């Protein structure tokens, strides 16, 4: 039962309904609840969270309540097609959202609403909030540097980067209209506008300025984030100081950088059941001896690439804990392509794990990741060095920063090749300097959480700011 006793202000929160977006929004909701706010969550029925994990929150299901509405009744539930909801609801969700917000704003038996906090990709919510004079804050679930690069996509497109091709890139959607001009030399060039990046990192983002749905979403996301009353980032100042200064110079809205994983785990917002059966095995492994492998909630690989991963792992002779989501291997239900005898005593495979807890386990020595931003921050939070195999979007950008800017990981930038996988795993497990840098980064993060530290101050000023509305 929701209790509003003693809670005088209410925050309405509206996550994008995908695991990598739901997790940070619920971590933020838990944080604001712990600071005394009453919480109302707006959510689609699609990817509905386990509401029983949040008896103290109020839930309103919006946008897809009518099962007969043909616009979304037959949309795919899995894979990239599931993202089509972002396009649809950004186009036609405004009236429903306004109606629900009007009900909340006039509710007599609930604390008054201070503000709306939505995922940055729900860009349609800004004009609805404006029309009701309701402050809208944005939760941006990727890094600050990703935002700056996304904001520069029109410029990078005009410079012709998206006309080059990179055969290790995974285009986000079919029919993007890339010219397939092989231009290997240019791929390794530095991007003048963002010297940490190589040209191939930009191509690997997988979408460009216009003529495709994702490009539109991104440019509207950037525009309406700039127009918001404030931006909350899952990050910390010491990690992205330069980018923070640039954003503060360019955008009037205040920024709040909070490393959510240090406040709450994502266990209660997990859309899949977390397997814990491997912990007795993990507990017996020596310190820093196990590679944890997970590629997040969306990524898929072809079977031949999956087999390269398997061989790369076997040849590395390292112990491993591997999250293989059902459907991760295209065309397979789960583990059908695996050879007999794999994983053997050296490894464990599960469908889904309590990732943060695993990363915090002392047996884990490295994280082989798709470089999703939550996974990256969670790894930084635990001081675990990374092996990066990004797919698209912000992931190739995260991988480049992890390997070349912070130097706490290795980027497998030539796709799936067993020798390179083996070498990268061995290198990261043995590289004591990289482990030391990962520890130092974690220590900076820990220090930022202590009273007077940047992350501590961010939480305090966010609470003050919301209370001021
Ligand atoms: N996650 C998890 N168990 C797993 C794999 C992933 O709980 O077995 C969580 C992980 O901790 C992270 C989220 O799922 O919070 C994945 O988000 P990320 O941004 O890394 O990738 P995405 O799924 O959006 O591609």
Image (cartoon, helix red, strand yellow):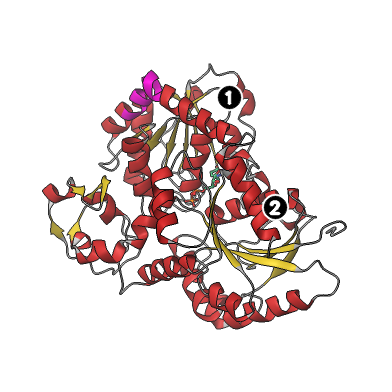
Identify the residue at horizontal 77%, vertical 52% (top origin).
36
Q: Is mark 2 within 8 Å of ligand 1?
A: no
Residue that carries the numbered disc 1 in the rendered image: 282
Q: CA distance from mark 1 to mark 2?
A: 34 Å
Q: Is residue 469 above or below residue 104?
A: above
Depth check, mark 1 against mark 2: the one in front is 2
Q: Is mark 1 within 8 Å of ligand 1?
A: no
- In the image, residue 408 lies at what x, y percent? 39, 31
Depth check: give the residue in front, 137 or 45: 137
Q: Is residue 197 above or below residue 340?
A: below
For the magenta stretch, what is the residue range? 424-434
- In the image, residue 446 lies at what x, y percent? 57, 32
Residue 270 visible in image: no
- The label on residue 32 is 2
Identify the residue at horizontal 43%, vertical 43% (top origin).
241
Residue 312 visible in image: yes
Quarter of the figure with residue 203: bottom left
- In the image, residue 297 lies at what x, y percent? 51, 51
- In the image, residue 183 lies at what x, y percent? 12, 53
Magenta span main SS: helix
Query: Is there CB contact under 8 Å for labels 1 and 2?
Result: no
Q: Is residue 364 above or below residue 242?
A: above
């Amino acid at each position: 039962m929701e209790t509003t006793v003693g809670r005088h202000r209410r925050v309405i929160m509206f996550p994008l309904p995908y695991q990598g977006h739901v997790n940070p929004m619920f971590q933020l909701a838990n944080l604001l609840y712990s600071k005394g706010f009453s919480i109302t969550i707006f959510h689609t029925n699609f990817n509905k969270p386990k509401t029983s994990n949040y008896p103290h929150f109020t839930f309103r299901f919006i946008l897809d309540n009518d099962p007969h509405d043909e616009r979304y009744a037959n949309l795919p539930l899995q894979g990239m097609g599931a993202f089509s909801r972002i396009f649809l609801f950004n186009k036609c969700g405004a009236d429903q959202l306004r109606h629900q917000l009007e009900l909340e704003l006039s509710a007599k038996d609930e604390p008054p609403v201070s503000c709306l906090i939505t995922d940055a990709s729900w860009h349609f919510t800004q004009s609805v909030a404006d029309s009701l004079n309701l402050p809208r804050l944005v939760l941006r679930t990727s890094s600050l540097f990703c935002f700056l690069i996304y904001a520069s996509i029109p410029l990078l497109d005009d410079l012709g980067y998206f006309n080059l091709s990179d055969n290790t890139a995974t285009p986000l959607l079919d029919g993007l209209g890339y010219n397939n001009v092989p231009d290997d030399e240019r791929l390794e060039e530095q991007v003048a506008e963002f010297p940490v990046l190589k040209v191939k990192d930009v191509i690997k983002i997988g979408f460009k300025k216009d003529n495709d749905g994702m490009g539109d979403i991104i440019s509207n996301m950037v525009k309406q984030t700039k127009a918001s009353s404030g931006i909350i980032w899952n990050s910390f100042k010491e990690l992205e100081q330069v980018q923070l200064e640039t954003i503060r110079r360019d955008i009037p809205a205040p920024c709040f950088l909070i490393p959510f994983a240090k406040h709450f785990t994502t266990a209660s917002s997990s859309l899949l059941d977390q397997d814990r059966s491997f912990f007795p095995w993990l507990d017996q492994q020596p310190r820093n001896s196990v590679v944890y492998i997970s590629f997040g909630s969306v990524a898929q690989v072809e079977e031949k690439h999956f087999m390269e991963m398997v061989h790369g792992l076997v040849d590395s002779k390292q112990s491993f804990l591997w999250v293989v989501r059902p459907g991760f291997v295209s065309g397979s239900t789960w583990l059908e392509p695996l050879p007999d005898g794999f994983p053997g005593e050296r490894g464990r495979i599960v469908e889904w794990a309590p990732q943060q807890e695993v990363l915090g386990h002392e047996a884990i020595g490295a994280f082989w990741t798709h470089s999703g931003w939550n996974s990256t921050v969670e790894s930084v939070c635990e001081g675990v060095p990374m092996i990066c195999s990004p797919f698209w979007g912000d992931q190739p950008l995260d991988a480049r920063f992890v390997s070349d800017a912070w130097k706490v990981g290795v980027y497998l930038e030539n796709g799936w090749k067993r020798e390179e996988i083996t070498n990268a795993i061995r290198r990261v497990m043995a590289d004591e300097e990289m482990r030391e840098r990962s520890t130092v980064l974690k220590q900076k993060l820990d220090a930022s959480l202590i009273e007077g530290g940047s992350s501590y101050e961010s939480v305090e000023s966010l609470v003050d700011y919301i209370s001021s509305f």
